Amino acid sequence: MNILVTGGAGYIGSHTVIELLKNGHIVTILDNFSNSSPAILDRIMFLTGVTPYLVRADVNDKETLDSIFSTDAFDAVMHFAGVKAVGESTINPLLYYSTNVCGSIALLQVMEKYKVNTFIFSSSATVYGSPSQFPIAETCATNPTNPYGRSKLSVEDLLGDIYAADNTWKIAILRYFNPVGAHESGLIGECPVGIPNNLMPYLSQVAAGIRPEVIVYGSDYPTPDGTGVRDYIHVSDLAIGHLAALEHISSSSHGVYLPMNLGTGRGYSVLEIIQAFEIASGRKIPYRYSNRRPGDIAQSYADVSRSNELLRWVARKDLMDMCSDVWRWQIRNPRGYAQ
Ligand code: WQD
């Protein structure tokens, strides 16, 4: 299939592009490189033998979108392009709505014009907010507690209205839990700009001696060891989940609208992650407790029965794979994609 991948140079997008190319798909990446590096294209080429087509543009750029859709007969679109930091979204909500919501609208309008109606949307477990039941199923209430989560849910709701108006659309909404890890080659991985917000890349930088210690946000949560519990999923499993979703919706004889969780169904605490990373890296990881981080929830882990059954997809990599692959990426790329 001929696939447009917006944000395809990003962390999850690039891992998905590799799986698409490995499976014989034709890929065009649309990316503005605001949170990614052009260097990744050489690495994708090295890993797959194929250099994807590249369009350097914002997803809001309707003129460029129209131009590429007018010349390229895409069969489907995977939409990763967006901004995704919870904390930043509370400081700059306009950026989050203009990029995540208006960008999606611009893309969907051009898709509609050119009658491309197979769409995979990169969503997030953040849409659930602070759930009261576990594991979290797709039928759980969605009640995001920050502008990032609300921007993602706004697009989900928009997609539901599009499908209600025209049920020939084939739409998969993939709610990621906590993506971590790196490609097993150590050639591509997560490359946070500045101080990492997320636990795993922060741990990796402490293990590498870049940062002195991990601050554990909260030790008084109602969890087994008092620290936050999350459902960490390897980015390569996530990427394969996208191909399974593409196969499922594109082969359907009718339109579909499918929100699905992509997780492992297993939660790990911050302390368990630290312990696993010490084993994977062979390094001691100093840490100290601090207050809870505003906006954090005690626990989050997925009910993955819908994606497991419908997509015949299961996350296969375990916590040690996740930590070992992050560590390999860290030590082979201490400056990320910077040459
Ligand atoms: C995990 C746990 C922290 C850093 C976020 C977004 C979510 C998704 C993934 C985009 C929590 C604790 C963290 C640290 C810590 N992104 N922690 N010290 O917040 O679950 O999810 O990233 O889709 O939308 O909300 O991930 O890795 O930041 O935190 O103790 O230095 O680690 O309190 O319990 P989070 P995280």
Image: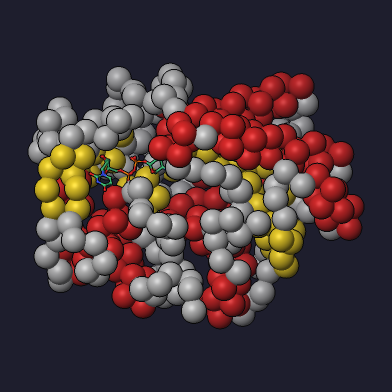
Quadrant of the displayed image that contains ligand 1: top left
Q: Residue 146, relative to residue 329: is it above or below?
A: above
Write the residue at 24% across / 62% down.
211
On the image, the x and y values in percent for residue 30 come to: 69, 57
Q: Residue 337 vs residue 266: left or right?
A: right
On the image, the x and y values in percent for residue 330 come to: 33, 70
Write the residue at 49% across / 79% down.
339
Q: Residue 216 vs residue 112: left or right?
A: left
The quadrant in which residue 173 appears is: top right
Residue 255 in view here: yes
Identify which residue, 329 or 320, lies in the foreground: 329
Image quadrant containing the N terminus: bottom right
On the image, the x and y values in percent for residue 134 come to: 29, 27
On the image, the x and y values in percent for residue 321 come to: 29, 63
Write the residue at 18% across / 34% down.
291
Colour mode of the rendering? secondary structure
The quadrant in which residue 17 appears is: bottom right
Q: Residue 75 vs residue 29: left or right?
A: right
Q: Residue 337, relative to residue 272: is it above or below?
A: below
Residue 3 in view here: no
